[in-house]
Image (tube, grey):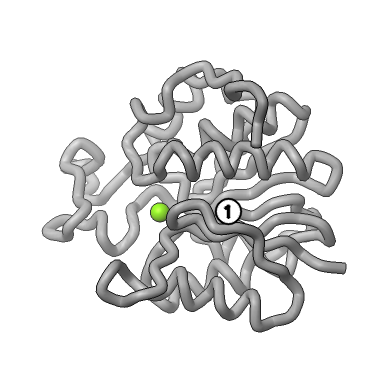
Protein backbone atom coordinates (compact mmCIF):
# COMPACT_ATOMS: atom_id res chain seq x y z
CA UNK A 1 0.00 0.00 0.00
CA UNK A 2 1.65 3.31 0.97
CA UNK A 3 5.42 3.28 1.08
CA UNK A 4 5.46 6.12 3.59
CA UNK A 5 3.50 7.05 6.68
CA UNK A 6 0.91 9.71 5.90
CA UNK A 7 2.00 13.21 7.02
CA UNK A 8 -0.53 13.42 9.87
CA UNK A 9 -0.18 16.43 12.20
CA UNK A 10 -1.89 14.52 15.04
CA UNK A 11 -2.52 10.90 15.95
CA UNK A 12 -6.11 10.17 14.84
CA UNK A 13 -6.42 7.89 17.86
CA UNK A 14 -6.45 11.03 20.04
CA UNK A 15 -9.76 11.98 18.38
CA UNK A 16 -12.96 10.43 19.72
CA UNK A 17 -14.36 7.97 17.23
CA UNK A 18 -14.75 4.42 16.08
CA UNK A 19 -12.47 4.12 13.06
CA UNK A 20 -9.60 1.61 13.24
CA UNK A 21 -6.17 2.88 12.06
CA UNK A 22 -6.11 0.24 9.29
CA UNK A 23 -9.40 1.63 8.03
CA UNK A 24 -8.12 5.20 8.37
CA UNK A 25 -5.03 4.40 6.34
CA UNK A 26 -7.15 2.74 3.65
CA UNK A 27 -9.34 5.85 3.45
CA UNK A 28 -6.26 8.06 3.28
CA UNK A 29 -4.79 6.03 0.44
CA UNK A 30 -8.10 5.89 -1.44
CA UNK A 31 -8.42 9.67 -1.15
CA UNK A 32 -4.87 10.14 -2.46
CA UNK A 33 -5.82 8.17 -5.55
CA UNK A 34 -8.90 10.20 -6.53
CA UNK A 35 -7.45 13.71 -6.60
CA UNK A 36 -7.91 13.86 -10.39
CA UNK A 37 -11.46 12.47 -10.23
CA UNK A 38 -13.10 15.03 -7.96
CA UNK A 39 -13.66 16.44 -4.48
CA UNK A 40 -14.07 14.17 -1.47
CA UNK A 41 -17.11 14.09 0.82
CA UNK A 42 -17.71 12.27 4.08
CA UNK A 43 -21.00 11.81 5.90
CA UNK A 44 -20.87 11.41 9.68
CA UNK A 45 -17.72 13.28 10.70
CA UNK A 46 -18.55 13.20 14.45
CA UNK A 47 -15.38 14.48 16.18
CA UNK A 48 -13.26 14.23 13.05
CA UNK A 49 -11.19 11.05 13.32
CA UNK A 50 -11.86 10.00 9.70
CA UNK A 51 -11.60 13.67 8.73
CA UNK A 52 -7.97 13.68 9.90
CA UNK A 53 -7.08 10.66 7.74
CA UNK A 54 -8.96 11.78 4.63
CA UNK A 55 -8.25 15.49 5.08
CA UNK A 56 -4.51 14.85 5.31
CA UNK A 57 -4.64 13.05 1.96
CA UNK A 58 -6.62 15.94 0.46
CA UNK A 59 -4.06 18.41 1.80
CA UNK A 60 -1.28 16.43 0.08
CA UNK A 61 -3.03 16.55 -3.28
CA UNK A 62 -4.61 20.01 -3.11
CA UNK A 63 -8.08 18.47 -2.97
CA UNK A 64 -11.07 19.54 -0.80
CA UNK A 65 -12.98 17.48 1.77
CA UNK A 66 -16.62 18.32 2.45
CA UNK A 67 -17.46 17.03 5.94
CA UNK A 68 -21.21 16.58 6.34
CA UNK A 69 -22.67 16.12 9.82
CA UNK A 70 -25.56 17.74 11.68
CA UNK A 71 -23.43 17.19 14.80
CA UNK A 72 -26.48 16.20 16.84
CA UNK A 73 -25.29 12.60 17.03
CA UNK A 74 -26.69 9.43 15.53
CA UNK A 75 -29.31 7.28 17.21
CA UNK A 76 -26.70 5.45 19.29
CA UNK A 77 -25.12 8.70 20.58
CA UNK A 78 -28.26 10.01 22.27
CA UNK A 79 -28.72 10.06 26.05
CA UNK A 80 -29.33 6.60 27.42
CA UNK A 81 -27.95 4.90 24.29
CA UNK A 82 -24.86 2.67 24.05
CA UNK A 83 -22.44 5.22 22.54
CA UNK A 84 -23.56 8.34 24.40
CA UNK A 85 -20.65 10.58 25.42
CA UNK A 86 -21.59 13.11 28.15
CA UNK A 87 -18.63 15.31 27.10
CA UNK A 88 -20.46 16.00 23.83
CA UNK A 89 -23.77 16.86 25.40
CA UNK A 90 -24.84 20.50 25.56
CA UNK A 91 -26.88 20.70 28.79
CA UNK A 92 -28.16 24.20 28.04
CA UNK A 93 -29.60 23.36 24.65
CA UNK A 94 -30.29 19.77 25.80
CA UNK A 95 -28.84 18.30 22.62
CA UNK A 96 -25.75 16.46 21.48
CA UNK A 97 -23.24 18.79 19.88
CA UNK A 98 -20.04 17.35 18.44
CA UNK A 99 -19.25 20.45 16.34
CA UNK A 100 -16.99 22.26 18.88
CA UNK A 101 -14.92 19.11 19.26
CA UNK A 102 -14.85 18.67 15.46
CA UNK A 103 -13.53 22.22 15.00
CA UNK A 104 -10.84 21.62 17.62
CA UNK A 105 -9.77 18.56 15.66
CA UNK A 106 -9.49 20.54 12.40
CA UNK A 107 -7.43 23.16 14.21
CA UNK A 108 -5.09 20.60 15.81
CA UNK A 109 -4.70 18.64 12.58
CA UNK A 110 -3.92 21.69 10.44
CA UNK A 111 -6.92 21.12 8.20
CA UNK A 112 -8.78 24.43 8.33
CA UNK A 113 -7.73 25.16 4.75
CA UNK A 114 -8.70 21.73 3.45
CA UNK A 115 -12.00 20.77 5.06
CA UNK A 116 -15.36 22.45 4.46
CA UNK A 117 -17.66 21.59 7.38
CA UNK A 118 -21.26 21.21 6.24
CA UNK A 119 -23.42 21.32 9.36
CA UNK A 120 -26.63 19.86 8.00
CA UNK A 121 -28.45 16.60 7.51
CA UNK A 122 -27.22 14.49 4.64
CA UNK A 123 -30.50 14.93 2.76
CA UNK A 124 -30.40 18.74 3.04
CA UNK A 125 -26.73 18.96 2.05
CA UNK A 126 -27.44 16.82 -1.01
CA UNK A 127 -30.61 18.58 -2.12
CA UNK A 128 -28.94 20.97 -4.59
CA UNK A 129 -25.56 19.25 -4.82
CA UNK A 130 -24.01 19.08 -8.29
CA UNK A 131 -20.24 18.84 -7.76
CA UNK A 132 -18.76 15.56 -9.07
CA UNK A 133 -17.13 13.60 -6.25
CA UNK A 134 -13.95 11.55 -6.43
CA UNK A 135 -14.80 9.78 -3.20
CA UNK A 136 -17.72 9.50 -0.78
CA UNK A 137 -17.31 7.99 2.67
CA UNK A 138 -20.56 7.02 4.39
CA UNK A 139 -20.37 6.69 8.18
CA UNK A 140 -23.59 8.37 9.27
CA UNK A 141 -26.64 7.05 11.07
CA UNK A 142 -26.95 3.29 11.19
CA UNK A 143 -30.72 3.00 10.99
CA UNK A 144 -31.85 1.58 7.68
CA UNK A 145 -33.61 4.83 6.79
CA UNK A 146 -30.53 6.95 7.55
CA UNK A 147 -28.15 4.63 5.73
CA UNK A 148 -30.30 4.46 2.58
CA UNK A 149 -30.78 8.23 2.64
CA UNK A 150 -26.99 8.60 2.66
CA UNK A 151 -26.56 6.13 -0.18
CA UNK A 152 -29.33 7.64 -2.31
CA UNK A 153 -28.12 11.18 -1.60
CA UNK A 154 -24.46 10.73 -2.46
CA UNK A 155 -23.76 7.60 -4.51
CA UNK A 156 -25.13 9.25 -7.70
CA UNK A 157 -22.47 11.97 -7.37
CA UNK A 158 -19.50 9.57 -7.36
CA UNK A 159 -17.78 10.15 -10.69
CA UNK A 160 -16.46 7.35 -12.91
CA UNK A 161 -13.30 5.96 -11.35
CA UNK A 162 -14.30 7.39 -7.99
CA UNK A 163 -14.65 5.52 -4.70
CA UNK A 164 -17.68 4.83 -2.52
CA UNK A 165 -16.56 3.81 0.97
CA UNK A 166 -18.94 2.51 3.65
CA UNK A 167 -18.04 1.96 7.30
CA UNK A 168 -19.25 -0.68 9.75
CA UNK A 169 -19.92 -3.58 7.43
CA UNK A 170 -21.05 -6.65 9.33
CA UNK A 171 -22.13 -9.52 7.14
CA UNK A 172 -23.63 -11.44 10.07
CA UNK A 173 -26.33 -9.83 12.23
CA UNK A 174 -24.72 -11.26 15.38
CA UNK A 175 -21.63 -9.11 14.71
CA UNK A 176 -23.36 -5.76 14.27
CA UNK A 177 -26.12 -3.65 12.72
CA UNK A 178 -27.11 -4.54 9.18
CA UNK A 179 -27.89 -1.18 7.58
CA UNK A 180 -24.34 -0.43 6.30
CA UNK A 181 -24.10 -3.97 4.90
CA UNK A 182 -27.45 -3.52 3.16
CA UNK A 183 -26.45 -0.28 1.43
CA UNK A 184 -23.12 -1.84 0.43
CA UNK A 185 -25.04 -4.72 -1.18
CA UNK A 186 -27.49 -2.29 -2.80
CA UNK A 187 -24.64 -0.28 -4.32
CA UNK A 188 -23.11 -3.46 -5.72
CA UNK A 189 -26.47 -4.65 -7.03
CA UNK A 190 -26.97 -1.33 -8.85
CA UNK A 191 -24.32 -2.46 -11.31
CA UNK A 192 -22.53 0.87 -11.12
CA UNK A 193 -19.79 -0.22 -8.75
CA UNK A 194 -17.23 -2.97 -8.42
CA UNK A 195 -15.96 -4.21 -5.07
CA UNK A 196 -12.42 -3.55 -3.92
CA UNK A 197 -10.86 -5.55 -1.06
CA UNK A 198 -12.54 -4.87 2.29
CA UNK A 199 -10.38 -3.49 5.14
CA UNK A 200 -11.74 -4.71 8.48
CA UNK A 201 -15.29 -3.27 8.49
CA UNK A 202 -14.58 -0.75 5.73
CA UNK A 203 -16.15 -1.51 2.38
CA UNK A 204 -14.64 0.08 -0.74
CA UNK A 205 -16.34 0.22 -4.14
CA UNK A 206 -15.17 1.79 -7.36
CA UNK A 207 -17.55 3.48 -9.81
CA UNK A 208 -17.22 1.62 -13.09
CA UNK A 209 -17.56 3.31 -16.45
MG1 LIG B 1 -18.56 4.03 11.82
Q: Most extreme residue toward the left, as rendered?
A: 80
Q: Most extreme residue toward the bottom, as rendered?
A: 189
Q: Which residue is mark 1?
A: 137
Q: In percent of the image, x 56 and y 77: which residue is there?
A: 185
In the picture, which quadrant includes the C terminus? bottom right
Circle 1 packing at 10 Å, graded few (<14), some (14-19), many (20+), is many
Q: In percent of the image, x 32 and y 36: which residue is there?
A: 16
* Residue 147 horizontal/vertical position (percent): 47, 70
Q: In percent of the image, x 21 and y 43: which residue is there?
A: 89
* Residue 192 horizontal/vertical position (percent): 76, 74
Could you say whether the residue bearing mark 1 is in a helix, strand or loop?
strand
Compare residues 204 and 150 and report the one nearer the observer.
Answer: 204
Compare residues 150 and 60 and report the one nearer the observer.
Answer: 60
* Residue 21 horizontal/vertical position (percent): 44, 37
* Residue 37 horizontal/vertical position (percent): 83, 48
Q: Which quarter of the rendered image does ligand 1 occupy?
A: bottom left
- Could you tell whether 32 is left or right of 25 in the image? right
Amino acid sequence: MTAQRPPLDIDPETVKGFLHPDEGLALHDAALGVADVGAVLEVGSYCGRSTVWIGTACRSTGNVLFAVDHHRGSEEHQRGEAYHDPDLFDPEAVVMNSFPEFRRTLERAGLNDVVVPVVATSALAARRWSTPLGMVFIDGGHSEAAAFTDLDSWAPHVATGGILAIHDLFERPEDGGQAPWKIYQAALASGGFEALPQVRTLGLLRRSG
